[in-house]
Each structure stands twice: as structure tokens, then as C-alpha cells.
Image: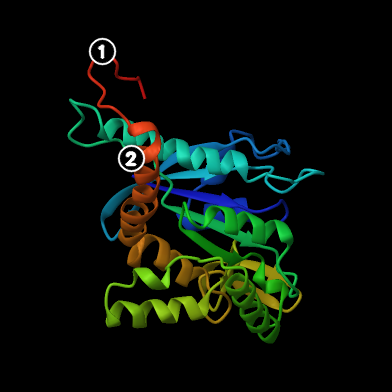
């Protein structure tokens, strides 16, 4: 199972984009509210599992959401419940690992990817954006995306992307795919192209329109239809391919080999480490 986490403050079209990515009403179900019901502004963590099919292969994904992230009057330390949740999943996996009679296949609830939605201001990142990504970049794979990118011109988009990358670098924030984890020159070459394209500028929509005789997902504007899956209009198709096809396995491997191992080493060094759990002590996780 692969688990994705999505963050942004309200009004950036996160729910629509998530539903478009996975071609289902995933976000609505995960939040547990009806379509016309107002979502409370809290940092409660909501999740839902969903099966998608790619190339005849079925994959089970879990989508995790915090409907009110960044919407409080005081957003100090609003990342703490999220960091706590990510670490709790590592702890569950670790406790299963140290069981004397552990399962042949340990249930994996760890978060493999965090999509962070950036407001298309065209200016600079908010302090909350920088603080959140800085705090969590060492425990989860961060992928920044620019939401509602059709509100910017092509030139504004490119300038904003460059500015965001510069700010992330200046603040020591590493996003996935991290340079130090490139396996070889071919891997580095492919990932360099992805890093240069980040943050992906995306548009989401669950509405279809007729364009040149075809039904396409898009957003209707005064200038025409912004086609969600048209690479000349936005980078949605590139993001989806990156997440679900080309880098899905690598996201899981980096989570296990880097982020989880870092957590595991820290825990095992604390107070002499975790002791093996026998059947009578085993927690019901």
C-alpha cells in the first residue's frame, strides 16, 4: 500500500486536484462530509483507501488529508499534529519489526509522499510554507506543487517556479527527488530534468468539455478551456505520471531506506533501544 499526504490552506482546489489525480471522489470520501456540507477548519487528520488501476495493475493507495491546515488565526506549530502522525506510522512499523513472532508481511501505513500545495501568488512563499516544509522534509518525501496555475501567464509561471526553487534552496529545504539519493548518472540525468521542472504547476477539474470533437477534463475561462491533461496548458499529466508510474516504487524505497531508517536508528539509540515484543506483550496495532 502507498500512502500520500496532501497539504494547503483552503481555496487552492486541493480536493478537486486529488479527485482528478485518482479519477474518483477520493477527497470527499476521505474528509467524510457530503458534497454540500461545510468542512470544519481544524487540523484533524482524515484518510481513505482507494484502489486505482494503471496498465492493468491494481494499486491500493491511502490518501491522508488535513482539511483545515493553515486556516487557523494562529498557525504556530500547526505542523506538529502532522509530524506526530508521520512518526506514529514509523513507530507502528518498528514495533511490528521487533516482534519475536512478526508477520511475514508487516502492514505498511507509513506516509510515502507529501504533496504541498503552493498558492499561485507569483511573489514569494509564505513563512508557513517554508516552516512546514523545513520541519517535515527530513521525515517524509516533500513534493511542492503550484495550485491553480492557470491564474498566471506562462512567463509568470516560470519566474515563480524559479523563485520558489531558490527560496527552498536558500532555506535548506530538500524536496523529492533528493540529489544525494540519485543512484547513477542516468538516474541523476532523469531526476535533474524533474527537479528543474519543479514545483509542478497544475490545474484540477472534475468537469468535462467538448474540445475539437473530444471530451476533456478542463476549466472554462473567458479565453477558452484550460485542458487539465494537455501538457501545453499545465503539468498535471507530468505530476500524475511522476507519482503513479515512474517514481512510485522509488518513493517507497526512499521512505523505507532513508526516512524510516533515520527514525529507527534514533529510536533504537534511545534508552537502550526497543526490546523484542513477545506474543503476550504484543500491542493490537
Which colour style is shown? rainbow
The residue drawn where x is 57% and y is 75% is 234
Q: Quadrant location of the N terminus?
A: top left
Q: Position of residue 31 (x, y in %)?
A: 59, 37
Point out the residue furthest to the bottom here.
155
Crowdedness of circle 2 by 10 Å Cα count: few (<14), some, many (20+)? some
Q: Position of residue 219 (x, y in %)?
A: 65, 67
Q: Position of residue 99 (x, y in %)?
A: 24, 27
Q: Is residue 12 visible?
A: no
Point out the residue furthest to the right here.
73
Q: Is residue 208 left or right of residue 263?
A: right
Could you tell me how far apart the alpha carbons at marks 2 and 1 are, in whole angstroms? 22 Å
Please, is residue 28 above or below residue 8 in the view? above
Please, is residue 53 above or below residue 74 in the view? below
Mark 2: secondary structure:
loop
Mark 1, residue position: 280
Q: Is residue 255 left or right of residue 147?
A: left
The residue drawn where x is 51% and y is 66% is 174
Point out the residue furthest to the top here.
280
Of the two numbered discs 2 and 1 in the rendering, the one whose residue sits closer to the viewer? 1
Mark 2, residue position: 108
In the image, which disc is placed on residue 214? none
67 or 20: nearer the eye?
Answer: 67
Mark 1: secondary structure:
loop
Q: Earlier in the sequence, mark 2 or mark 1?
A: 2
Q: Quadrant of residue 54?
A: bottom left
Q: Position of residue 151 (x, y in %)?
A: 72, 72
The residue drawn where x is 43% and y is 81% is 193
Amino acid at each position: 500500500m502507498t500512502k500520500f499526504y496532501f497539504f494547503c490552506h483552503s481555496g487552492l482546489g486541493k480536493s478537486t486536484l486529488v479527485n482528478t489525480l485518482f479519477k474518483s471522489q477520493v477527497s470527499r470520501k476521505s474528509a467524510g462530509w457530503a458534497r454540500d456540507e461545510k468542512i470544519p477548519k481544524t487540523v484533524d487528520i482524515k484518510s481513505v483507501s482507494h484502489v486505482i488501476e494503471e496498465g492493468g495493475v491494481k494499486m491500493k493507495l491511502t490518501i491522508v488529508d488535513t482539511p483545515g491546515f493553515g486556516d487557523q488565526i494562529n498557525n504556530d506549530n500547526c505542523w506538529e499534529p502532522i509530524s506526530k502522525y508521520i512518526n506514529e506510522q514509523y513507530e507502528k512499523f518498528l514495533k511490528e519489526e521487533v516482534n519475536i513472532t512478526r508477520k511475514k508481511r508487516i502492514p505498511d501505513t507509513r506516509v510515502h509522499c507529501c504533496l504541498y500545495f503552493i498558492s499561485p501568488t507569483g511573489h514569494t512563499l509564505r513563512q508557513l510554507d517554508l516552516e512546514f516544509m523545513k520541519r517535515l522534509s527530513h521525515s517524509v518525501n516533500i513534493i511542492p506543487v503550484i495550485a491553480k496555475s492557470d491564474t498566471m501567464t506562462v512567463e509568470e509561471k516560470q519566474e515563480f517556479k524559479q523563485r520558489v526553487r531558490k527560496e527552498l534552496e536558500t532555506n535548506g529545504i530538500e524536496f523529492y527527488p533528493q540529489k544525494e539519493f540519485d543512484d547513477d548518472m542516468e538516474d541523476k540525468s532523469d531526476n535533474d530534468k524533474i527537479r528543474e521542472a519543479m514545483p509542478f504547476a497544475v490545474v484540477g477539474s472534475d468537469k468535462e468539455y467538448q474540445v475539437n470533437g473530444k471530451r476533456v477534463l478542463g476549466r472554462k475561462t473567458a479565453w477558452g478551456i484550460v485542458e487539465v491533461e494537455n501538457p501545453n496548458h499545465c503539468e498535471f499529466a507530468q505530476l500524475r505520471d511522476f507519482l503513479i508510474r515512474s517514481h512510485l516504487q522509488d518513493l517507497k524505497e526512499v521512505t523505507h531506506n532513508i526516512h524510516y531508517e533515520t527514525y529507527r536508528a534514533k529510536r533504537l539509540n534511545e534508552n537502550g533501544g526497543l526490546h523484542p515484543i513477545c506474543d503476550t506483550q504484543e500491542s493490537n496495532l
